[in-house]
Amino acid sequence: MIATSRVPLIVAPMAGGPSTPELLAAAGSAGAFGFLGAGYLSVEALDGQIERTRALGVDAFGVNLFVPGADAGVPVGDYAERLAAEARRYGAELGQPRWEDDDYPAKAELLLARRVPVVSFTFGHPAPELVTRFKAVGTEVWVTVTTPAEARLAAGVGADVLVVQGMEAGGHRGAFANDPGQPGAAPLYGLLAALRLIGAVTELPLVATGGLVHGADVAAVLTAGAAAAQLGTAFLRCPEAGTQPAQRGALAAAERETALTRAFTGRPARGLVNRVLTEHSPAAPAAYPQLHHLTRPVRAAAAKAGDPEAMSLWAGQTYRLAPELPAAELVELLMTQARDAWSRACGRWLDQS
C-alpha cells in the first residue's frame, strides 16, 4: 500500500474523535493515505465510518485496532477517591473502572468482512491466525512498535509493515506491555534512534511516527530509512478533523508543554500539560482501560464546558509548529517543504564535495 501511494504521507489514526472520514477524504485528495481510529467506537459506529469513508470516494485507507491486554487486576479505588473532586467540579460522576476488550474480536471480524485495505494494531500484535486471515482477504497488516524487541515479535507473526513510534509522539504510547516501572510503558527511544535500532533487526518496511509536523521532518525520516512518515498532531487543527474546540484553542495558544501521563487512561500518553495531568499523574496506576472508563465522564463534561484543564489534550512535542490548514493544503505544503529540505541538504553537501 505504501508503494502505491502518491506521496509518502500517512494520516495517523487518532481515536476518540479527531479521525474522521472527511479528514481521510481531504488528505487523500492530495495523495496521502489515512487511517480511521477504531478505538472506543462501537462495532456499529466503526462500520458507519467505513461506509462513509467509501461513500466519499476513498478506496485506499486503513483502520487501527487496539489489541487488548490481560486484566492485571490493578486496584484503582484510591485513585478514584482522588478524582472525586474533579468530577464534582463539573457536576459529573466518575465512570465504572471496568476492564473490557474494546470489542476487539467483533471489530476484527467486521474488518475482515469489509475487506479493509490495511489494518494496523496498537498495544500489541495480532495472533498469527488472524494475520493469516487478513492476508487471505487482501488486507495488509501493520503493527505499531516502539522497541527492537517489539519489532521482532511483530515480524514473527507475519506483519507486512512496522509503524515505528518515537517518544515524541502525541497520544498513547504503542508499547506492547504497560510496565508500571516505565514512565513510557517501555524503554523510550527518540524517533530517529528507534528507526536505526529497529531497522537493524528487520527488513520490513518502516513507517516513522512521532513529532513530525514539518516537511523537513518528513525528509529526515525518509533519509533515515523510513518508507513513509505518519503524522497525527499535524492534522489536529484541520477543519476536517473532529478535534474538540477546547483542544483546538489550546493547540492554537501554544502555551503549554507536553508530558507523558497515565492520569486519564492508565496507559502512558503524551498530551498538553493541564491541571489533571499535573496533579494526578504521580498517583495514576497502570490500569488500562479501567482509568479510561473512570475518567471518561469527567473528560466529556470538561469538553462540554470548554475547559481544557480536565481533558486529555493529546499532542506531540512539536505541536506548536503545526499550522491550521485544510488537510489537502497541509499535505501539499508538507511535500513542498520536504522537497525543499532535501534539495537544500543535497545542495550543501554537493557544494562541499
Image (cartoon, rainbow, N blue to C red):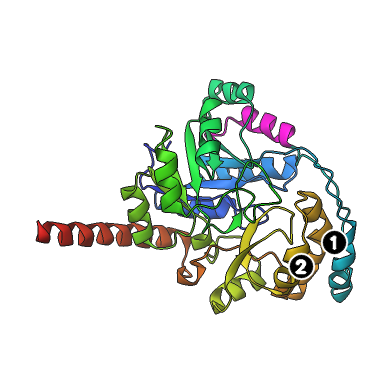
What is the crowding at mark 1: few (fewer than 14 residues within 10 Å), some, or many (at least 20)? some
Above or below: residue 104 compared with residue 313:
above
Q: What segment is highlighted magenta in the picture?
A: 104-118
Task: Give me the residue at 56% from left, 79% from top.
Answer: 255
Occupied quadrant, residue 225? top left
Q: Residue 111 colored magenta?
A: yes
In the rendered view, does 153 fall on the left or right side of 200? right
Tag 2 residue: 280
- The location of residue 103, given as percent across then percent down, is 76, 38
- The location of residue 70, given as percent across then percent down, is 77, 37
Decide which of 175, 140 is in the foreground and name it.
Answer: 175
How much space separates mark 2 and mark 1, taking CA atoms?
Answer: 8 Å
In the rendered view, does 302 fall on the left or right side of 31? right
Q: Residue 173 colored magenta?
A: no
The secondary structure that most of the magenta stretch takes on is: helix
Q: Are marks 2 and 1 in contact (CB under 8 Å)?
A: yes
What is the crowding at mark 2: few (fewer than 14 residues within 10 Å), some, or many (at least 20)? some
Tell me the SS state at disc 2: helix
Q: Is residue 60 visible?
A: no
Find residue 155 and name its label. Answer: none
Above or below: residue 112 compared with residue 260:
above
- The location of residue 320, given as percent across then percent down, is 49, 72
